[in-house]
Image (cartoon, helix red, strand yellow):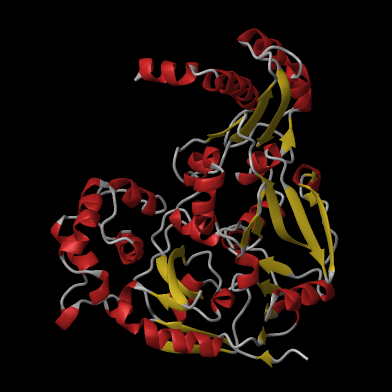
Amino acid sequence: MTEVSGAIRFILNDVEISLTDVKPDTTLLDWLRLDRRLRGSKEGCAEGDCGACTVLVGRLMDDEIIYDSVTACIRFVGSLHGTHVVTIEHLRGKDGILHPVQQAMVDHHGSQCGFCTPGFVMSLYGLWMRNPDPSQTAIEKALQGNLCRCTGYAPIIRAAKSISSYGQPQGDPLWAERIALKGKIKAITDGTRVEVGEGAERIIVPSSVDDFAAIYEANPKATIVNGSTDVGLWVTKFMRAIGPVIFINHLQELKRIEHSDDAVRFNAGVSYSEAVPVIADKFPELGELWNRIAGEQIRNMGTIGGNIANGSPIGDTPPAFIALGAKLHLRKGEKRRELLLQDYFIAYGKQDRQPGEFVEAVTIPLLPADEKLAVYKISKRREEDISALCGAFRLALDGNGAVASACIAFGGMAATPKRASAVEAALIGKPWTLATVEAAIPAFAEDYQPISDMRASADYRLLTAQNLLKRFFLDTTGQGQRLRREVA
């Protein structure tokens, strides 16, 4: 019999919180500002884009507290059980002076109107705690999810580079508090299930993956929330009711990454940030795409499984994973099944997933050394933007230079992520030449009938997909790099 607790418990700065009456759709930002009167975190976009609401959330991983920057506007309070939430009000230096991050921002004139400043400070705080001497690239990556409309980024980057001249992380109060905090968090995460509220207002925090599977099988209409980077917008933008909700972001079993000789298995709860070292090592062709998935806060929250499970036609990862031949692992109660990822997507808003069944993991085969892979993301903004379309191209040539196999998959071109089967057929068996590519291009119209929307017109999408095939040809034959050097 699973033991059940009736309170969401976490630590806010230096205060232990226990909530027995909280709604499934209560965001951390609203709770901080309205209930706790902590108004340093600001609401700018209410969709996780601007970073003005950034806070740190610490969670226990391998007996260490790991702090991630997150956007409080789309993070739900129900997801905080067993965490340490740090807001800008908790920052402090020694003997009442400013914190090193704050002092650096002051001295380098990193703030003007000040609205976005708390979010920048918290993002830089998180970076400084894990990397006190960051490169400019690391700084820019950490600030992808923070937007400033008046100061500009140069003084903020200068401030980021100078933080350690004002102090080291080991001297930070939060560093010293970690030992005591670990004990408190362990006491909270004692293996019990949490249930708060009733009916549509019910919140469930499972004690384990097995507990989650049993709960979801019995409550198939409940909303599963892990990173909330999608569901958060259902609430803040569409005012949708989401209860009852099962929060699963705390389940360590879903954060495992398993390796074999020829594949990597990512369990569904692995965040984009947690996957970075494995992507860099095993799938370097996906590195650029990975760094362009939203901003740092969203990469810290969003998960590989969630990006697949929601079935979005513009999810960033499915085209690449389909091209790599990924296999999906689904679970309902104690029953499990597998299918190719490309077969999971049936139609817009419809996936091959039964009521009460969830995505447990995805296994991605390693790319053979003699094959080529490229992924191209097209968006209005280069950084922190949703794809207008995203194309993945995989190619194997035979000993004579002809196309032995090809796999081309696109997001943003159809109602689901979808392979370009007609284009593939037009390439296979032909010599890998520009003439072959040109001859295959008309087949895109057989594979896709894209729509026009706010991100791109149908004509633009179709033309761009065709041009991306040409780009892939140029890149695989070494001509693309030469042309880019000539243009530069």
Q: Residue at x 46, y 63 (%)?
A: 71
Residue 52 vs residue 444: left or right?
left
The answer to whether residue 413 is visible is yes
- Could you say where residue 468 lies in the image, as x and y percent from the top left? 58, 24
- Could you say where residue 125 lies in the image, as x and y percent from the top left? 31, 65
The N terminus lies in quadrant: bottom right
Q: Residue furthest top?
A: 435
- Which residue is at the front of the view, 33 or 9? 9
The answer to whether residue 148 is visible is no
Residue 423 vs residue 87: left or right?
right
> Which quadrant would residue 166 be assigned to in this image?
bottom left
- Could you say where residue 233 lies in the image, as x and y percent from the top left? 59, 58
Q: How many marks?
A: 0
Q: Residue at x 80, y 64 (%)?
A: 331
> Which quadrant would residue 126 be assigned to in this image?
bottom left
The C terminus lies in quadrant: top left
In the image, is residue 35 above or below residue 158?
Answer: below
Q: Residue at x 59, y 82 (%)?
A: 22
> Which quadrant would residue 454 be assigned to in this image?
top right
- Could you say where residue 170 lies in the image, as x and y percent from the top left? 26, 74
- Which residue is at the front of the view, 327 or 422? 327
